[in-house]
Image (tube, grey):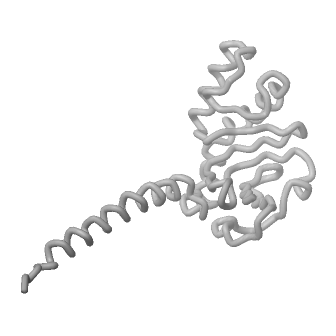
Amino acid sequence: MVHVNLKPALRKTVIGLVIACCVVAVPILLILWMADPLNLRAPNDRALIVLFHDHRMALERLRQMATEDLNVQGWRITASSLNEKLDDARKREYRHLLSEVQPLGMSVDYDGTVRFAYAGGGILAIGPEWGKGIEYVPGDYRKKGAIVQNLDRARKLPLGDVYLRQIEPHWFIFYQRD
């Protein structure tokens, strides 16, 4: 009878399985971390309120410029997406102000609502997307979202609506989860 030692073969099999699991799991975990579908990296309300008060003048100026330039620039504004039709001085001012307030991006709606996104995530194909930031609403804010007292635990709010926490008249923290 031949005695076969199974320990080395079993050890190689286990090591191979662990490596295979890591090869599959690590990219998936990395994608989930980058997409942040559960908004674990969302800034808290206090941080956004401090940012608003520290950079109010820049936010106001960007809001004014975006509204004025809507027909030229379009609805989405980032430092790298400035329209070539804007003159160089205007582009420099946008870049300077955007570098001061550092949003991921900003957008303007035709009614004058301007949104500064500071966090967002989600994997559209398999789950909800979300965004959080600061928003200026010129008119009736009740048409733009539901007013809440705190957005620090906003991921527990129902899907499909915009939630607003007022900072000052017309200025809000927004949270949207679709």
**Where does the image place residue 58, in percent across and percent down from the top left?**
67, 35
Quadrant of res 156? bottom right
Q: Is residue 61 left or right of residue 113?
A: left
94 horizontally vs 28: left or right: right
Image coordinates of residue 83 in percent, x first then y, are 71, 20
Placement of 109 over or under 161, stated as above or below? above
* In the rendered image, the vertical position of residue 62 relative to residue 119, given as above or below: above
Residue 93 location, x and y as percent? 65, 23
Which residue reaches farthest front? 1
In percent of the image, x 91 and y 47: which residue is there?
139
**Camera-nearest residue between 102 and 33:** 33
Residue lying at 74% horizontally and 37% vertically, measured from the top left: 60
Q: What residue lies at 70% left-to-right and 32% top-to-bottom?
A: 77
Q: Position of residue 124 (x, y in %)?
A: 67, 54
160 left or right of 99 in image: right
Up the image or down, 95 lies above or below 11; here it is above
Location of the N terminus by quadrant is bottom left
